Image (cartoon, grey):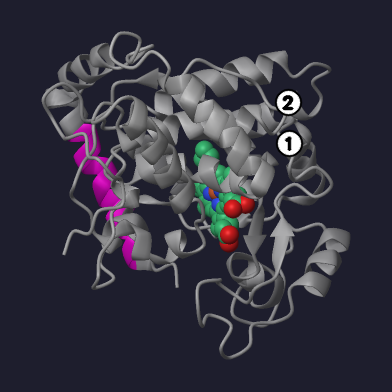
């Protein structure tokens, strides 16, 4: 499913990005970063961040499983064509980012639309969908007992989307550390950023689909990934049976069952994800890949053994800010729409 073609495309992207960075990247990046700032709406919509937080409290009171999904949405929005809200766009022909396989398990589109509708009543045509997603991600972490951090705003929304961008830009869950570093370096994120951002898997769940290969057919010989802790693998095999015909019908990928990303504390944003990865190899191969590089492994070990979350939380705020600057539309670029999920066809 996660094809070699995508890996080759990622390598090509990496080379192209390296060249582009040398020529225009730094000038463009600094112009973009200058336009994003904490408190962008202070003059135009001073209550914007309060409105988002208040709505998020209500949304999570109704369904707290939306917190991880909204955090994940910011990552998927930023990695695919930049943090431009394009993940919200809809197609009658199944052609948008939303329609791509990795986003079929995404939830929370209605929640973003609900926040947008609320903001339109107090500050019409002012706050972008991309910024709402960034603020909702921050609030999702905070309301999951994680840190508060100042989020930069000032992004504008894009109206270009294509399902294939998603599979080209997001690393698949069976990525090794070379793949992960390639995909993340295209977005100017380094090994430390990778180790820090993977801590997002401290909250939420996965369908069985992304781990079935790891549990049942790792090398094509009906075997199990040897780097996965045997006791953990046994638990996972009980929850996730081998793939059956029809598992991929409908929205869920690999049946309806969901397994925690960080067992025991999957709705609390904390450091236990790092202890889990160190002890078991993590849920996805990509989580376990952190152990196969000296920088990312060193970081996992440091956080897993930390006596206080403070340093990790500061690193997390910095990495989220960095990810949130990915290829943003600012100034006269892009648009502010009355609703986020408009149809493109
Ligand atoms: C190599 C990088 C990554 C891979 C391969 C990956 C893969 C996945 C997969 C397969 C799922 C389960 C989806 C499902 O079946 O429902 C998931 C869930 C999740 N991911 Fe990632 N992810 C990566 C990086 C990140 C990053 C950087 C963030 C945050 C900035 C993030 C946040 C989340 C969250 C919060 C969930 C839980 C979603 C929920 O409970 O609905 N992921 N990820």
Q: Is residue 224 above or below residue 322?
A: below
Report if residue 18 lies within the magenta region.
yes
Q: Is residue 115 above or below residue 172?
A: above
- Decide which of 177, 148 is in the foreground and name it: 148
75 and 334: which one is in front?
A: 334
Residue placed most toward the observer, 40 or 21: 40
Q: CA distance from mark 2 to mark 1?
A: 6 Å
Q: Which residues are magenta?
A: 5-19
Q: Quadrant of the C terminus?
A: bottom left
**Residues at badges 2 and 1 in contact (C-beta under 8 Å)?**
yes
Near mark 2 (Cα within 10 A), the count class, few <14, some 14-19 or many ≥20, is many
User: Can residue 78 be seen in this snapshot?
Assistant: yes
Q: Name the spot of residue 277 as percent of width and height, x first.
A: 73, 44
Q: Nearer the viewer, residue 224 or 335?
A: 335
Left or right: where does residue 91 sit relative to residue 131?
left
Which circle's residue, 2 or 1, is located before the other in the chain? 1
User: Which quadrant does the N terminus fall into?
Assistant: bottom left
Determine which residue is flagged by label 2: 303
Task: Specify whether 323 is left or right of 267.
Answer: left
């Amino acid at each position: 499913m996660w094809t070699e073609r995508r890996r080759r495309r990622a390598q090509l992207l990496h080379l192209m990005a390296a060249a582009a960075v040398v020529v225009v990247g730094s000038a463009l990046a600094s112009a973009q970063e200058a336009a994003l700032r904490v408190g962008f709406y202070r003059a135009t919509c001073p209550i914007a961040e309060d409105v988002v937080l208040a709505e998020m409290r209500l949304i999570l009171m109704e369904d707290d499983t939306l917190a991880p999904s909204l955090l994940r949405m910011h990552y998927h929005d930023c990695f695919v064509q930049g943090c431009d809200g394009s993940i919200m766009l809809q197609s009658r022909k199944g052609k948008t980012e939303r329609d791509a396989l990795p986003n079929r398990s995404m939830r929370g589109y209605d929640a973003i639309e609900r926040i947008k509708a609320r903001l339109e009543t107090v500050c019409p045509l002012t706050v972008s969908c991309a910024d709402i997603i960034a603020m909702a991600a921050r609030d999702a972490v905070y309301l999951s007992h994680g840190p508060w951090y100042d989020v930069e705003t000032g992004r504008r929304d894009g109206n270009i989307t294509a399902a294939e961008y998603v599979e080209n830009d997001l690393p698949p869950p069976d990525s090794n550390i070379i793949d992960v570093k390639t995909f993340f370096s295209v977005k100017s994120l380094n090994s430390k950023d990778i180790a820090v951002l993977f801590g997002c898997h401290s909250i939420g769940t996965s369908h069985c689909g992304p781990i079935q290969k790891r549990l049942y057919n790792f090398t094509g010989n009906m075997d199990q990934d040897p780097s996965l802790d045997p006791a953990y693998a046994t638990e996972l095999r009980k929850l996730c049976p081998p793939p059956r015909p029809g598992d991929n019908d409908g929205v869920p990928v690999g049946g309806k069952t969901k397994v925690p990303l960080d067992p025991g504390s999957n709705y609390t944003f904390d450091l236990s994800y790092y202890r889990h990865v160190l002890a078991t190899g993590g849920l996805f191969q990509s989580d376990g890949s952190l152990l196969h590089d000296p920088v990312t492994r060193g970081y996992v070990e440091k956080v897993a053994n930390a006596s206080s979350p403070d340093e990790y939380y500061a690193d997390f705020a910095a990495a989220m800010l960095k990810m949130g600057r990915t290829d943003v539309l600012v100034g006269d670029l892009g648009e502010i729409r009355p609703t986020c999920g408009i149809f493109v066809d």
